[in-house]
Image (cartoon, helix red, strand yellow):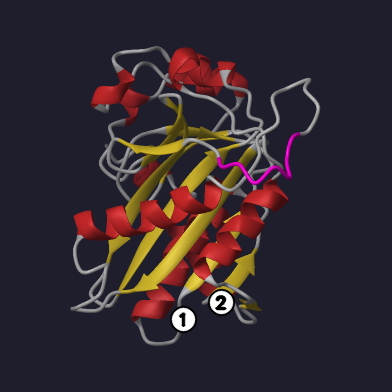
Amino acid sequence: MKLLDLTLPSPAENLACDEALLDTAEAGDGEEVLRFWEPREHFVVVGYANKVATEVNVAACEARGIPVLRRCSGGGTVVQGPGCLNYTLVLRITADGPLHNIGVANQFIMRQNRAAIATLNPQPLGAAKRGGDGSTLNVAIRGHTDLAISERKFSGNSQRRRKHFLLFHGTFLLNFDLALVSQLLPMPSKQPDYREHRPHTEFLTNLNVPANEVKAALKQAWKAEESLKNPPLEKIAALAREKYATREWNFKL
């Protein structure tokens, strides 16, 4: 698997990059990839089938100058920004492999990610750094594709499939302004059972682990060592310009 640690200048370009990597692989011109990127500004991302007016406090976003974008995969609405780490997996689908349908792929990928994150040592704010004792973090897979600690979510994920490759991507809350979520998003129209109608501030948590440690754990878990030398930059730019930066796409529902 190839490694791509690439944060592009705009939210539209970063979302476009994931779809471009999937399209390139499906066309036979790409490979399996693990990508990382870290947002430089705040923005909201709705899932492919989300209705913006239902899932986003549009007035609050407009008042703050925070853009609303739509991704190509499913799942719920999230707020992105500094303190988040995003990752992307583009993986090959085989008839007899662990990715042959949506549910099996979710389980396989989430188990891999859970095991990787469980090896880390979170650092509570204001506390001395722990580590080196060989202990593991009590990370649980909750809902379909959430990772949680003590029933509080710190990672959400979603999937998009083609015939030969799939895209699986998600966000880790590392040191994010969680109060901002309540200001920009109402309660979601669909909730996993384990949420139990808790407000955002009681449902979400930060992992409090440096981004480089999360990256290292995931790189090891997915055996991503060699860098991707020629990302599809022209395709990314075209997708960003013609799709992800347009109101027609982002507010289509």
- For residue 85, what is the image quadrant? top right
Circles 1, 2 touching at the beta carbon (< 8 Å): yes
Q: Position of residue 36 (x, y in %)?
A: 60, 57
* Residue lying farthest to the bottom in this orientation: 28
Q: Position of residue 167 (x, y in %)?
A: 37, 62
Bounds of the magenta segment: 130-136
- For residue 172, what is the image quadrant? top right
Count of marks overlaid on the render = 2
Q: Position of residue 136 (x, y in %)?
A: 56, 42
Identified by mark 1, the residue type is Glu
In the rendered image, which residue does mark 1 sit on? 31
Judge whether 100 appears above or below 250 on screen: below
Q: Which residue is at 49% across, 59% downward?
A: 88
User: Is residue 1 found left or right of 247 in the rendered image?
Assistant: right
In the rendered image, which residue does mark 2 sit on? 2
Identified by mark 2, the residue type is Lys
